[in-house]
Image (cartoon, rainbow, N blue to C red):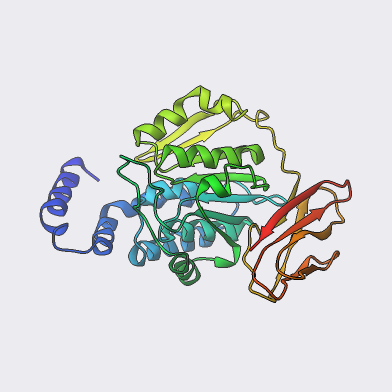
Amino acid sequence: MPSFLKKIIGSVYRGWLRPRFSLIQQQRFKLLWTIWGYWPILLIKPIGLKDRIRLILRSMRVDWYVQHAHWPGEIARVVAAIGERKARLGEVVVEAGCWQGGSTIKLSIICDMLGYRLVVFDSFQGVEHVPGDPFSGKYSAALDLVKKNVAMYGQIDVCEFVPGWFSETLAGNTFQHPTQVLYLDCDLAKGTQEVLQGVLPFFVDGGAITSQDYPIKAIKALLDNKDTWRSLGVPTPVLVDRFRQLAIFRFKKHTVPVTAVLALSPLLPTVAVGGQKGFSGSGGVAPYSYSIEADTTGGASIDRTTGLYTAGPTLGSSTVRVTDATLVTVETIVG
């Protein structure tokens, strides 16, 4: 689009449209000049042309109905990073920060097409409060709303939602799944570092770290600092692409230690009193066996072979463990 036309549209938008229309209406209006940003999706090779076009059309539907904070050209580059190849055994995509689920929906569609699970971490209470930070408390959306949006417009069957602050869900290295693409939209340097701390030990060689927050000074300083990566035990990645607020980093191949051989899913699920949930192992060396290592529900049980878990008669939690043929184990908490 010619620069003079961009200036005219921008002037009309700021001076006349913004004061008169809701945020979702403004988002629809912006599609007039942002919709072309979806072009990287047309280059995704592992899926056919019809699926690429379908993906763009479904993404545009999200832009029309679900309020979000990204541009088509930003999320399209994340989708293209996921679309480089089909998922290998146990691999996932991680989204850290999802607001109302606009980006989640788009990521879930490409994940479904290529066989990835999408694991979504968010407090669902807004950005964590940090004194003096302008984003504190913003972008709050209930988990039920996010699930409703994803179920309506995306592929919720491939999604796993993990509620809680990043310091609780990721900083303790509890996430034990090989991650191909990480999408960071934390709005805080503190949260960004906590997510990296949890995900990087299990990052796939050749994967992509994408940040929607790169223009935020504290986050840019964190990601550009070699000491950040040194403290996490990995080499400094290379900034390979920039578009508006998005930055994409990659490690040189064969430099990331991948420690997630065995994985257990789902991660940190919630099961009602007396309810059931199926668990499955991946990676490692089959066959797998399942066990309960701790329980406060008054008698939870699990089938050692199939991984079918049954909660006890009282509120509480259980620790479920999978063990592979080499006696490697992975655990998760059932709430």
Residue 140 found in image quarter? bottom left
Residue 223 % position (x, y)? 46, 31
The answer to whether one can see residue 61 in this image is yes
Which residue is found at the position 49% from the left and 67% from the top?
Answer: 147
Badge count: 0
Q: Is residue 105 above or below residue 189?
A: below
Residue 202 % position (x, y)? 66, 41
Q: Nearer the viewer, residue 28 or 18?
A: 18
Q: Nearer the viewer, residue 304 or 295?
A: 295
Q: Is residue 36 left or right of residue 229?
A: left
Which residue is found at the position 52% from the left and 40% from the top?
Answer: 194
Q: Nearer the viewer, residue 270 or 279?
A: 270
Residue 317 found in image quarter? bottom right
Residue 137 % position (x, y)? 35, 52
Q: Is residue 52 left or right of residue 7?
A: right
Residue 243 % position (x, y)? 38, 39
- Residue occupying the far left of the picture: 15
Q: Nearer the viewer, residue 173 or 38?
A: 173
Q: Is residue 131 left or right of residue 113?
A: left
Query: Which quadrant, please, contains the C terminus?
Result: bottom right
Which residue is found at the position 25% from the left and 60% from the top?
Answer: 23
The answer to whether one can see residue 45 in this image is no
Which residue is found at the position 35% from the left and 36% from the top?
Answer: 215
